[in-house]
Image (cartoon, rainbow, N blue to C red):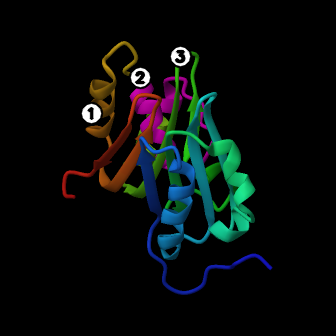
Amino acid sequence: MPHEPKGLNEECGVFGVWGNPNAASITHLGLHTLQHRGQEGAGIVGLTKDGMRRHYGLGLLSEVFTNTDQLTPLIGRAALGHVRYSTAGGRVLENIQPLLFRFSDEAIALAHNGNLTNAISLRRQLEDQGAIFQSTSDTEVLMHLIRRQVGQPWLTQLKTALNEVHGGFAFVLLTEHGLYAAVDPYG
């Protein structure tokens, strides 16, 4: 029987590892310690020799990863994991993080804990400019803001996008070049 969250919950849990060949396994263990922060879904993106791979689903971590063989396709030098407790967006599969975005020149995984207070207005603005969203999560807004800065150095893209979002948040992004963390100005 799937776990049904009841009572008080904390917000999402995010865990990342860079530069370790056991990154996916370490991330899986790290998410176990954060399970109390989110029981609606779980996911891990692994940076493998063949690019980024993702395993995710609704439910507790133990329901999404029913055996350790599910970590095998994620084996690589880095990983990003997330356990979800929704504050924005529905309890549906497309909102389970880390979100994985594939572009012609790169792939980026994104996980988020918090609540963006201007996400609705930013989303409307982005949609008016042609953005197409794949989820109802406020997390996806950040990636669209980042991609509006194409042509700028990566850290400039990220900083510019982060300056546009408001609220309490912690983001972790995984690229082929690094693992990046950011928190709101109030920490």
CA gap between label 1 and label 3 equals 20 Å
Q: Earlier in the sequence, mark 2 or mark 1?
A: 2
Which amino acid type is shown beneath numbered disc 3?
Asp
Q: Was residue 1 drawn as part of the magenta stretch in this picture?
A: no
The kind of residue tagged 1 is Lys
> What residue would you read off at disc 3?
105
Residue designated by label 1: 159
Mark nearer the N terminus (2 vs 3): 3
Please count the marks in the image. 3
The secondary element bearing badge 1 is classed as helix
Mark 2: secondary structure: loop
The magenta-colored residue range is: 126-148
Judged from the image, the secondary structure of the residue bearing numbered disc 3 is loop
**Residue neighbourhood size for the residue with mark 3, other residues' Cα within 10 Å, grouped as few (<14), some (14–19), many (≥20):** few
The front one of 1 and 114 is 1
Residue visible at 33% across and 34% down in the picture: 161
Q: As drawn, which residue projects farthest toward the bottom?
A: 7
On the image, the x and y values in percent for residue 24 come to: 56, 51
| Rendered location of residue 144, percent (x, y) | 47, 31
